[in-house]
Amino acid sequence: MTSSFKSIEENLKAEAGKLLESGRVEIVLAYGRGYDENHPMPFVAKHPSDVANMVFNEYCIHNLARYLVRYPRGTKIAVAVKAADCRAVIQLIQEEKIKRDDVVFLGIPVYGMKNPKTGEIIDSKTTCGMYNPVLYDVLLGEEVHGQKIVSPYDVLADYEAMDKEARWAFWKKEFDRCIRCYACRKACPMCYCDPCFIDQSKPRWGDKSPQSHGNLMYHLTRFHHLAGRCIDCGECSRACPVDIPLYLFHKKVAKECEEMFGQAAGMSIDDKPALVNFRVDDSDKILE
Amino acid sequence: MSRIGVFVCHCGLNIAKTVRVSELAQFAATLPDVVVAKDYKFMCSTPGQEMIANDIKQHKLDRIIVTACSPLMHEQTFRKVLAASGLNQYLLTIVNIREQVSWVTHDIEEGTAKAKALLNGAVYRARLLAPLTSRVIDVNPDVMVIGAGIAGIQAALELANTGKKVYLVEKNSTIGGHMAQFDKTFPTLDCSACILTPKMDSILQHKNITMLTSCEVSEVKGFVGNFDITIRQKARYVDHGKCNACLACTEKCPGKGVSEWDEGLVKRKAIYIPFPQAVPQKPVIDRDSCTFFKKGKCRLCEKVCEQKAIDFDQQDTFIQVKAGAVILATGYDLMDTKPLIQYGYGKYPGVYNALEVERLFNSAGPTGGKVTMRDGREPQAIAVLHCIGSRDKNNSEHCSRVCCMYSLKFAHLFKEKTSADVYQFYIDMRAAGKGYEEFYNRIIGEDVKFIRGKGARVAQSPDEEGRLIVEAEDTITGKFIKVPVDMVVLSPAMVPRADSRDIARLFNLSTDKQGFFMERHPKLAPLSTMSEGIFIAGVCQSPKDIPDTVAQANGAAAEALTIVVKDKMELEATTAMVNPASCCACQNCVRVCPYGAPFFNESKGVSEINEALCKGCGLCASVCPSSAIIARHFTNDQVLAEMEGLMEF
Amino acid sequence: MSQTVTPYLEMSQAIMEAGGEALKKCYQCGTCAGTCPWTPITDFNIRKLVRFGQLGLDGIEDFMWGCSTCKFCVDRCPRGVEIIDVVTAIRNVYSGGGMLPQSLRAFVGSLSARGNPWSGDQAKRNDWAKEKYPLYTKDKEYLFWSCCTVCYDPRNTRLAKATAELLNQSGLSWGLPSVDVNCCGESLKKVGDLELFERLKNNNLDYFKSNGVSKIITVSPHCLASFKKDYGDDYEVLHLSELIARLVKEGKLTPKKDFGGVKVTYHDPCYLGRHSGVYDAPRDVLKSIAGLDFVEMGRNREQSMCCGGGGGGLWMEKLKGERLSDLRIEEALETGASVLATACPYCITMFEDSVRTLNVDDRIKIKDVTELFLESLDVNIEELMAGASDLNFTCKM
Amino acid sequence: MLKKTAINKISELAAVLMEKGTLLAPVKEAAGFNFREISDAGQVNLHFHNTIISPKSAFFPQMEDFVRYQTGKSILEAAPVELNLKPVFLFGVRPCDVKSFEIMDIHFSGTGAVDPYWKKRREAATIFGHAFDLNEAADPAEFYHTLGIGAADPQGSDIFMVTKDNDLLFKSITPKGKKLLEELTMLTEASAGDRKYFEDYIARGHDYKTRFASVEPKAIATEFESIFDNREFWKNVSNACLSCGVCTFVCPTCYCFDICDETLFNKGTRRRVWDACMFTDFTLEASGHNPRTNVYQRLRQKICHKYSFSIRKYGVISCVGCGRCTRYCPVNIDIFSIVEQAVKAKWYKRL
Amino acid sequence: MSFEPKILGIACNWCTYTGADLAGTTRLEYPQNLRVVRVMCSSRINPSFIFRAFQLGADGVLVGGCHPGDCHYNTGNLYARRRLAVTRKILEFAGIEPGRFRVEWISASEGNKFAEVVTEFTRQIKNLGPQNKFKISQ
């Protein structure tokens, strides 16, 4: 049984109100009304009175972990987190961008979120496909059980089956369409570098112009920077104005990292991010 | 725009044979920013070097490319040439066209083409070279030696004699370490105290040495040249300043404590000095056995002490010590043989371990040098069992190197002091040191019985009361042998101190499986460690005998001296630095650096790099997502430019 | 016989291929020979056997039968050499083609023909049970693996009976294996006939798989060690003493009868102690019986002395004065105990013989822990045994 | 002059235009429609509401090469990139986008130095305007009517097209359009009924409502000037903003660009690329100082540029209400809701 | 003229570069398609270097480092092993033949291993032919 969006909204408002009144947190990150029903916006509540503008429906798909790094270190923040978003916050804690006791997790068990552009239900084809948050201080609805658990990496099967020429042609076509608006980078909770490597001019890693080799360097390096850190929330693909299926590449890298290093991103606070860690007995086979 | 000078070397025929050097020079002249392009027979020769120096002045060159042999050969030579002619020594790039081109091909076309590509890469890189000045930090001249066994004492004396101030830190209440417990030392059988106490005394008298006994290291901060170490001075309840070592208190004291120094064979007073020649020869009070601390009354020693040196409410104090280098000589312990139930140590009183027997022989020991067993009898038959816990997968896989020799010494001393038959149960007699084999032959001559077979079991003799049976297989005859003896001596494995891993963590060292400190390189750098400025000597690195320990102590003293002899220290120039504008505070660099050079500046919210600790490997530069870290001399754009140049043709 | 030999490396290569590769790690330190209980009383020398194996010297077959695989040497070997595997490999290589000693020929013959070492009729395997106890079916939780020795050897059938009774009393759902199972093959493997061992093992595995066996109770530590080591690890194998200890702790079984202060000492069977690491369970069971004055022998737990029955020893001739079981009985007598308890049918057989040959059967009785425990539950074994099957043979000694 | 043709014959018209010059028309892609240079006539597809990226890229492409040079040689020897253009036919441009060219003309050729690239491309192009379908509901994000642009406003197009059942009516508005329309012989003459239908379609277009009421530019400008320093207001509206470059890149009236050198193997090109005031390094000065480091400063800059500075400087709101920035914003920020809040937020006076 | 590949080598100064010098001093012969960049440690190699190398037209990239456990900087190559493994998987998924990028642990004393690896790698790249996927066309 899954609790309706309405009941989650009520719980969210109640909980946010309590937290703000008690002064436990200075800010609550949730969702507010957008220019119409299908387009809610991330919303920041600072006073108990702001809680009234909060809303929660099937289009509240944004990953609010993105905004945590924007506030000075140590501000007490409550954040409404769905399953994937929760893993993003855990990964930020792993990387010591925020401290565990500065964040209040308002967990939202969720099923049936919709992508406003296409109207389809968001599922494990474009995200991690998890329903219940991994970690939460308050749960705003009943845990979702009984849903079919589909591995988030099944969607890769036919891309991995492609031969490399076809796969190269596919990715070249996709990356050539990129207009370098960097929405994917800004939407990603793990991409908090400002300036990013691609903005640097000394060294010039990739050209600024939206030609294929500049786009290729930007995207491939970003995939590498997110290896073992990407929590597969799908925000980058949804933010892309030209709908480049970035989630495919991120899923592939996440799958390889899980197989090679035996650790999925953002699953527990005590893990260390995979690429700043090593095991002396890592097998050399991963290099073949 | 840079003004690059390219100098191609023939190296006699070594290069010229398979690379058209003049054509290479002409090719260089055509490249952008190249102002001078010459080739010469021997660039590394004096005329060759002068040619470079002159061209620098004459053409006002600001980048030099030497196309010759491997940078590992002559990079330093040509750097000196640049420095001599007023150009920053890092504005130099070496192109290796000998080891990696001319010597590995016979095809002159292929060789020349590759040389051109490598040269082109060097030109791209040379344009982006930046002058680097290595920072100089001042060095604290003092040295700290931790552990005052023979290793620590020897190192401290060597350093103090050069005029350096030395802090000698010892956990026990006296210096001397295990060697002070011995009676004789192999192979010369000279008395351990006779060769050690003079050194202990000169430590006491030496104006440059500050002796810190009953002290432990509690915290280590800083880096090579500028260590800031906190020492915990454990409370001794005796003010050593006032005490004139009349030792009246030790006679009156009713307290009874187990004497660690005598390996528990005998009791000692609560206020005591471990052994007569102890340095400092001033007593300390052991809380656990002092009746005042236990029951709140007595204070006899206080009444008796004319100097009023007794102070029961003394507390642990902390001493801050600054040092330029640190030598660890923390020594070893013998393995606890109680878990090896087959030998019955701790169960049968007739079973002793090596250190206990050393105390028996020692004239200052519990029995005044007489070999009498715990029940007062003089043993008629004694068995010495080798390799107890050593060379054993289930305990310590290493060979402890010295037990064969001290077992032979025991045999000699037993023969000399008693009329007992002595058996040695051994696997291999390892007598490889100077004079060792001769000592072994001498002992064989003294009618000691050698049984080639590891002792398998020690059991109580069923018929003779108080006697033990050593069971083993004499592998030479293949017979099962049961030897009735009165006394069994075990030669246990030498293992690192129980707290060796904590000390390693304090000084950022790694330890091997057993817990011995890891040297930087087993063959070429056995005394230095991965942490710059921290040196190791003696058994804390691996089991060894006294001659090797002393040699290592001298070596470690010399290496420490190389740091503290200069009051300034030049840091490597090719270290890394953080550009704060681009740092996104992800702290990847802090997590990966093996030397702990980067640290997170909480107030500024960015990472910074302590250039004294940085070794210039560049790991942090490659894990930095926003490439905010500049690895000097191997910056991102220098490497990218070189790659671009290499791939152009 | 001349003293000169030449190394015959093909043989040592064969030994290594047959599972003895650890023999190259041995540096001949003599600990094993010094520890082996046989060295003092026989001319068997395990170190010399390994040495011969290292160089493939001939003459090895003369003294390769002295080992009773008690694992004392393996635990003490400073190089971690699996000496039992070396002995098994040597026997496999050198015992091919009828080179078996006379006393073992019957043993191997019976196993290959009848699937049990006692030349007992395969069909009569469960006769001791007299259909009183259920066969194992899929729905049952435990399979009570009745070892061949407790099926055919008259003295040990009492052990089978006692176990069956006890399992009933404990209310667990259990069943006996059908007659088409055969010996677990542990001793056979240690005698070196690896090929036959595989056949016996696979037959048992087929039975296990087809009947969905998952939990097995063994009464013989030899079956316990064999199932755990060689039968894969998807079976949960328990020795009976472990099960009883658990049931007592859980309060499902509580001894009633008071033994009135009888002095009992306990012998750790090598395959229950050193091979399988079970030391405390049998002791807890004995100590749970009121009025039982428990006393330890000098050599106990890890240091327990072997009874000599392992590695085919039960079936081999032993000269007088070269029997470990005799020494063990003397050691038991020294403790003043009147009952020597143990938990292995092999040990019981060996000790019963020694008690008879030393004619001290009036001073000490040999009992299995299960038998003692059953007595404490006020069940009289005698009348249980009244209907014992009329087996027409006695075990040869 | 009014001509027409059947909608399903559009590909023939496209083929004719392709011979005359370069045809840019809406093409269906994965994420929606975009103006692309047509290589095969079948690509032209008019079943669209509006393209993702505005047609400004026809005259102000995302990447324009200025000079090609050789490292190490003097700049004098560098070769400027010649811009020899064939005639361009910009087919199927919505009225709000057509209006945006007029606004962009102010910046690129109206004031100060004329941008030769924009001017050349503009002159070489003939614009086929295309009316919105009036019986379809307006896209929720659009608000062009608020800025005085009719749904079928032909003003600014050379030729204006209106769909009538399954025909397409073409009316020439400018002489350039008239000349081209005459050349397009394959179009048939339209009937009187078609002309009448065309006229009142235009009229109906004017009162075709979008979201907001009409606004008065001067009033908005003064509101924004007084609210400029109200940090609280701007923080609230920009809390959700990711500060990415989507809104500026899809916007028809954003024209900021950056000039950069892209070198490879000693050869280099100096080229112009789109830049966005929302990027953090947009205002990064050589000294390292950056006047706009916070998101609210950048969002305030973007909105005030269009609804405050543009009015003060050129008297016109630099926005045509096409709604692209709202439709493609990853976090659904709507520019005109902010304008509305700014105007309604009378309480700013109290500060 | 048969296809002569351009191979970029990135070698760590303490082990592989010294090994390469040793191959030279022992006069071992190997094809000359390899152009080596010297860096202080294999952990200095930023994965973007590998992407950039292929964009510059490299037909193959060979990275050489110390054997795990021998790194002059203690743990450098242990991090490099993980990072370059991910780089390899990204290249593979993007469509670059896995055979074009290779990581080898070559110590300072393994001159012959260096020569063998370069010869074998050059032969492998020759079979794969020119790489013009990532290559920036001028």
Image (spheres, coloured by chain):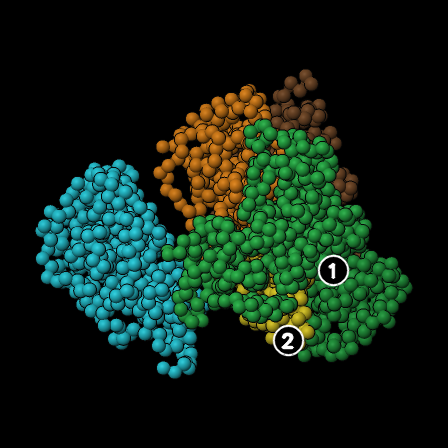
**Three-letter code, disc 2:** Leu
Write down the colour of chain A.
orange
In the foreground, D226 or D19? D226
Q: Is residue A110 above or below residue C205?
A: above
**Three-letter code, disc 1:** Arg
Q: Can the viewer see residue A181 in this picture?
A: no
Residue at image point 9% right, 51% down? C387
Q: Which residue is mark 1?
A: B125
Write down the colour of chain B.
green
Left or right: where C332 falls relative to A48: left
Q: Nearer the viewer, mark 2 or mark 1?
A: 2
> Which residue reaches farthest right?
B58
Write down the colour of chain D.
brown
Mark 1 burial class by Cα count in 10 Å: few <14, some 14-19, many 20+ = many
Chain letter of disc 2 in the image: E
Chain cyan in the figure, letter: C
Where residue E9 appears, as percent x and y from the top left, is: 64, 64
